[in-house]
Amino acid sequence: YLNTLNYHLVLPLTTSGYIASSSQRLRLDSVYTNDNVYQPPYRFYYNPLTVDKYNYGQDHWGFYNGVLNHQNGYNFTRLIPAAGFGGVLTQNAIPSNIVPSQALGLNRDCDSANMQAMILNQVVYPTGGSSVYTYEPHKSVMVPTVPVTGGGLRIKEIKNYSNGYLAGTTAYSYSGGK
């Protein structure tokens, strides 16, 4: 049975406090189980890159991409990319008299390093063993042959450790997209 959850969130734990702490996220840090015998907790570790929750630097799928899409102020139109994949200036898709270029963001392309902000990296088990996760961006092909990187992260590899020594590695490969 579950006994205790430990989490991290800036206090005060109120709606206004959470909204005001723009760089903090609710994060599960550990789980203690209750089976009438004390055991160390399950512990969870995350990628330390923390992004302001109101940041417009995001790819087409909402993952952080490190791009300053909010120049000249925060505005939803900043999420319309000017360049990169799907960029309106790149493809001459929207005339500048309809959406002026100063209203556009820079781009919404995927960045495989930045999109891993705050993602779970490691679980340490009560036994002392652990699992370390490596991720990669999803890859697919648009009709007919345009490669697309993005659409989220997927597990690339899991390394399992026992007593500090590598006990096994599982590598994942995906078909269909790539």
Image (cartoon, helix red, strand yellow):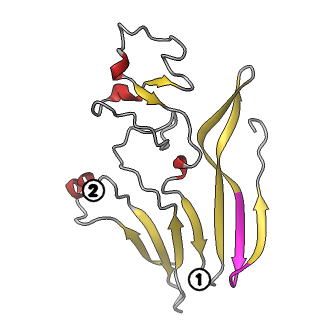
Specify the quadrant of the image occupied by residue 110: top right
| Amino acid type of the residue tagged 1 in the rendering | Pro
> Looking at the figure, which quarter contains the C terminus?
top right
Is residue 161 covered in magenta? yes
Main secondary structure found in the magenta portion: strand
Residue lying at 25% horizontally and 64% vertically, measured from the top left: 13
Residue lying at 63% horizontally and 83% vertically, measured from the top left: 128
Is residue 149 covered in magenta? no
Horizontal side, residue 55 vs residue 92: left or right? left
Q: Who comes first in sequence, dot 1 or dot 2?
A: 2
- In terms of secondary structure, where does tag 1 sit? loop
Q: CA distance from mark 1 to mark 2?
A: 32 Å
Disc 1: CA contacts within 10 A as few (<14), some (14-19) or many (>=20): some
For discs 1 and 2, the disc positioned in front in the rendered view: 2
Instruction: Give the residue at the far bottom of this rendering.
Output: 37
Q: Which mark is residue 126?
A: 1
Residue lying at 59% horizontally and 71% vertically, measured from the top left: 123
Residue 50: x and y in percent read 42, 56
Horizontal side, residue 118 vs residue 55: left or right? right
- In terms of secondary structure, where does tag 2 sit? loop
Residue 173: x and y in percent read 78, 49
Question: Which stretch is magenta?
Answer: 157-165
Residue 118: x and y in percent read 48, 57
**What residue sits right under mark 2 in the picture?**
21
Q: Which mark is residue 172?
A: none
124 is higher (above) or lower (below) than 149:
below
Which residue occupies the foreground of this view, 69 or 139? 69
Residue 105: x and y in percent read 40, 28
| Amino acid type of the residue tagged 2 in the rendering | Ser
